[in-house]
Image (tube, rainbow, N blue to C red):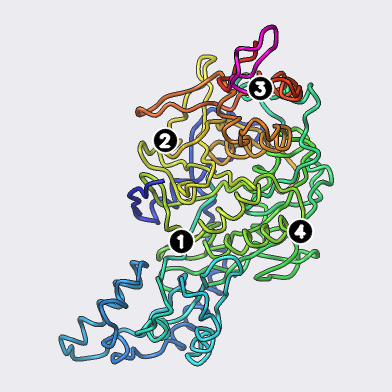
Amino acid sequence: MNKKKCEYFAWFVVLIITAMALVPVSADNTEELFTNISVPLTSQQYAAYEVSLDTQNSQLSPIDINAFQKLSETDLEKIDDQDLLNFVQTIRQQASAAQKGPIAPAKVFKVLFKYDSDERELIQALAASLGIADIYFYKYTNMFSVVADANQLVKLLQNNQNIIRIQTDKLSTPEALTLGAATEAITHVSMMHQAGYDGADAYVAILDTGLDASNLEFGGRVTHEHCWSSPANLLPDLLSIASCTDSTRTMQLTESESAYPYWGELSSSWWHGSHVAGIAAGNGGIAPKANIIALQVFSNFTVVYGEQTNLALSWDSDQMKALEYLIDLRQSGLNIVAFNMSLGGGSCSGYCEDDPRKPLFDLLAELGTIPVVAAGNSYYDGFINYPACIPSAFSIGALNFVNNKPEIASFSNHALAVDLLAPGVNILSTILDGSYAYGSGTSMATPMVTGAIALIAGKIPETTGASVQSFLQKVSTQSATRDQYTRKILDFSKIPKILEALKQPWWTVGDTNQSNQPVYNFEGTVW
C-alpha cells in the first residue's frame, strides 16, 4: 500500500469541532451540533491549576545552551514533534545571536520516542542518569512515552544513534440502545436477531471515556475493565489530570482495574463511552449478547492550549497501553473480534503509515481483532482523522436518514480511506448514570459496525477466503456517494440467508455454474 500524504491541521480547532452532541431523550433531537464536553473550571479546580502553575515555575531548569548547540542536523531531523522542534530551534537561534538577557526556562514536553529495540537497557540507563522519571516502554512496539523538560530530551537525543524518531503524543477527542427506526430501516439488524445471531460468543473492546459496569443495559456482560490516564503539567499550554478511580470511586488514580471515569463532581459528564458501548453491545444494541471489555483512556484537561476549561481528551500513549493490554488478552485465548475507537483528531488525506499506534493495530489485526475507528466529524471531504487513517483500521463514516433514504451525514469526514458507512444521527443509547439520550456523530456509527462484527465473526467459513470486513462490504445492497467516493452501507438484509448458504460444503463462493444450487457470488446476491 503506497504511503499517502498526511497533514496535521491546528489540533485545537480539531479538538473543539470533532466531537458529537448529546440530546436528552425528551428533547427535539433534530439538531446537528458537534461540540466536546466543555465545562468551566470549578473553584477547586482553579485552585489546583494555580498550584500546578506555581509548582511548574519553581521546578523548571535553566536552559543548558551547550546541549542545544551540540545537536547535529541528523539529530534535528529526528524531531517530528513540531512544538519541540520549534522550541529547540528558537533556543539555538538565540544562542547563535549571542542574545543578551535570560533565555526562557526549559519547557516540559510529552512525546513518544521510537528507538532501536536492541538497545533498550542503554536508553533506560541514560534516561535515569538524566533524571527522567516519567517514562514508559511498550511491550509490542519499539517506542516509549516520556514527560521531560527540553534539557533532558535534548541530551537523550544528542548524537544517540539508538534514537530513531521523536513523535508527537497526540490528543484525541471523543468523536461524538434502543435502536431507532431509521437504524432499522437502513441496516435491517432485526433480521440478524430473528435468525439467532446475537454475538454471544464474541468479545468487543471499547476504548473510550469509560462506563459503569453495573449499568443494567450491559446485562452483566462487562468482563474486563481497565483505565490509563496520564496527568501532565505542560503549562502554559496543557494541564491534564489523572481520571481513573478504584471500585470505591473515591480515589483518583493514573491506572486502575475500573473503567469508571473519575472527574469529581463532573463525572456524569463522561457519558460518551457508555453511549458507544450501548450501541455496540447493550441489551438493545447491535450485538445484545456480546461480552464487553471496557477500557478508559481519557484524561480530564483543565487547560487546553492556554484556555481554562474542562475537556475529555486522550493521549496516544494511553491508547497504546490499552492496545497492548488487548494484545495480552487476545494471546491468552480470549475471542476479541474487534476493538472500537470512537475518537480521533488531526487530518489525513490518505493513509498514515507513521502513526505510533500502527504497529499495535497491525498486530491485533493479525491476531483476528479488527480495529474499528471513527472517520471523524470535521465536515472534511478528502480527509479523515487519525487514527482512522491507519491502513489496518476499518474506518467508519456516518449516515443520516433523509426522506426515507440514507445519505452521508454532512459532518462525517469522507475520503479514500473510509471503508463503510453506518447510521450516526440521533442514535438512542445509555449514558453513565443509566439513563438514555440521543447522540450524533461518527462515534455512533462506529460501534454499529463493531457490533456487526461480533454478530458474524466466526460464522464465515475459511474456505470463502473472505475477511469479516470484506464480507460486510460485499453483501451490502446499499451505497452512498459524496465527493467522488462511493462506499457501501452496513446492511444485514441478506446476511442470514448467505450465512446459512455458506454452511453447505458443496456451495462454492463465486461459482455460478452449478445447476439448481444457490450460490453466493460475493456481490451480495443469493440465487
Q: Is residue 346 magenta?
A: no
Q: Earlier in the sequence, mark 4 or mark 2?
A: 4
62 or 407, nearer to the observer? 407
Q: Contact, CB < 8 Å: mark 4 with mark 1? A: no
Q: Left or right: where does residue 504 sit relative to residue 128?
A: right
Residue 370, relative to residue 303: is it above or below?
above
Please give the residue where the numbered disc 4 appears in the rendered image: 332
Most distant residue in the left direction: 97
Please give the residue where the numbered disc 1 appears in the rendered image: 170
Q: Residue at x 63, y 23 (%)?
A: 509
Circle 1 crowding by C-alpha within 10 Å: few under 14, some 14–19, many from 20:
many
Q: Left or right: where does residue 480 sit relative to residue 70?
A: right
Amino acid type at image mark 4: Ser
- Spatial separation of the CA atoms under disc 2 and disc 1: 22 Å
Circle 4 crowding by C-alpha within 10 Å: few under 14, some 14–19, many from 20:
few
Foreground disc of the pair 3, 1: 3
Amino acid type at image mark 2: His
Q: Left or right: where does residue 490 sit relative to residue 328?
A: left
Foreground disc of the pair 4, 3: 3
Q: Contact, CB < 8 Å: mark 3 with mark 1? A: no
Tag 4 secondary structure = loop
Please give the residue where the numbered disc 3 appears in the rendered image: 508
Q: Earlier in the sequence, mark 2 or mark 1?
A: 1
State the image coordinates of residue 35 (x, y, percent, origin top left).
Answer: 49, 45
Range covered by the magenta-colored residues = 509-521
Please give the residue where the numbered disc 2 appears in the rendered image: 414
